[in-house]
Image: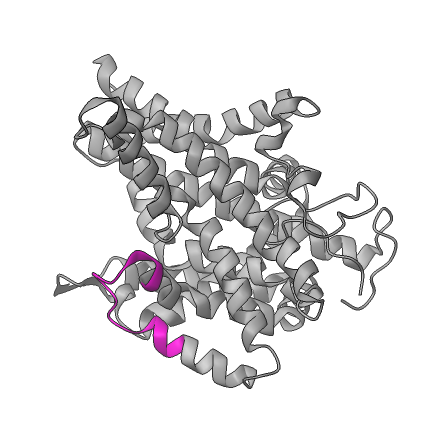
Amino acid sequence: MAGTTHPLHPHPEEAARLAWVDVAKGLCILLVVMMHSTLGTGEAMGGEGFLHTVVAFAKPFRIPDFFLLSGLFLGRVIDRDWRLFADRRVVHFAYFYGLWVLIQSVFKAGLITADAVGTGGKLAAFGLHLAEALVVPYSTLWFVYLLAVFSVVTKLLHRRVPPLVVLAVAALLQMLPTAGWPLLIEEFCGRYVYFFGGYLFAEWIFRFADRVRARIGLALVGLAVWAVVEAVLVFTPTGFPEHPSLAGLPGVSLALGTVGALAIVAFASLMTRAGGPVTAALRACGQRSIVIYLGFFLPMAFTRTLIAKSGVAIDIGLASLIVTVVAVTVPLAFERLVRGTRLDVLFRRPAAFHIAPAPAAPRRAVPGLARPEPAPAP
């Protein structure tokens, strides 16, 4: 990336770029946790609350933006040799995926082995479950799995297939009726276009964010128009079970995902310019998005179950909000507590799981999902 300086003392322009990326990732991870918390709480309590409306509004752009952000820094390592590339973009994600599949599975062992008979049968069932997770993305961890897959596919296609051809094919895959297909194939088809777009248009996206900060009034008008159009398309029914709203129609979904992802980029850029405690909180979440993503499931499930079984009369929207807050804050607090201890390996890949030299200095990293480890300066 042009303008790169010493990692501990980034150029102001580079620092601003990193700041809005952090804020955008922070917003995205909050929306992801909110979605899981809200839908699960509503199901457990037999109803819906005000956060269900927010979750529905964010559906077209929530995951597309996360994948677009995850592709932004791929260009820093894609031309490196396979060993270094795999260490940064495959082994990194594989380590966390495998570790947290095991952790989540241990907590769900009773359900996983419920139909098995005897100790041997239960161990066999649990082992089969882990083996299946190698080829079928498991639970909420599918995002981490796909990041490794997307990175490898992009590296394989790099300089072999014209990028615009790849983008066009990825766009066509996104519009395919993939409901009922194997999860890995379904999610690949539905999401790869955003990851590849983030990689291919990274510099344009950074320039777009710069222009947003320079033209605040125009950017605010654009965000307002986008929000109105998004709401109309999301909440207008079609009468078709496979696409219950206009936002889910082929082509419309792709457009909303793309424009919505850019809207989040614009919003994050404006928030970075404005500053303040909310921006600082979003940026902190973005810098530790992988911590939140890996760790939110258990506190979310525990809090949701506790509220649902407590018998206390509480609004479903408020309950969903409480579950969301707990699911975000507990992983952050736990990561801070275990930092520097042996449990640090839950959120930081140890040297034994590197296949290439780790970065030499403890840089001010952006340890979220879009750039798992700082790549060596080109």
Residue 248 on image: x %, y %: 27, 65
- Which of 5 and 221 lies nearest the eye of the viewer? 5
Please, is residue 306 above or below residue 377 in the view? Answer: above
Q: Residue at x 40, y 32 (%)?
A: 104
Residue 349 on image: x %, y %: 64, 39
Q: Say if residue 178 shows up in the picture.
A: yes
Residue 287 on image: x %, y %: 64, 42
Q: Say if residue 312 shows up in the picture.
A: no
- Which of 370 and 94 lies nearest the eye of the viewer? 94
Q: Residue at x 35, y 35 (%)?
A: 37
Residue 155 on image: x %, y %: 58, 70
Query: Left or right: 171 with respect to 358?
Result: left
Please name the colour scheme applied to the rendered image.
Answer: one colour
- Which of 360 and 260 lies nearest the eye of the viewer? 360
Q: Which residues are magenta?
A: 171-185
Residue 180 shown in magenta? yes
Query: Left or right: 141 with respect to 87?
Result: left
Query: Left or right: 324 with respect to 357?
Result: left
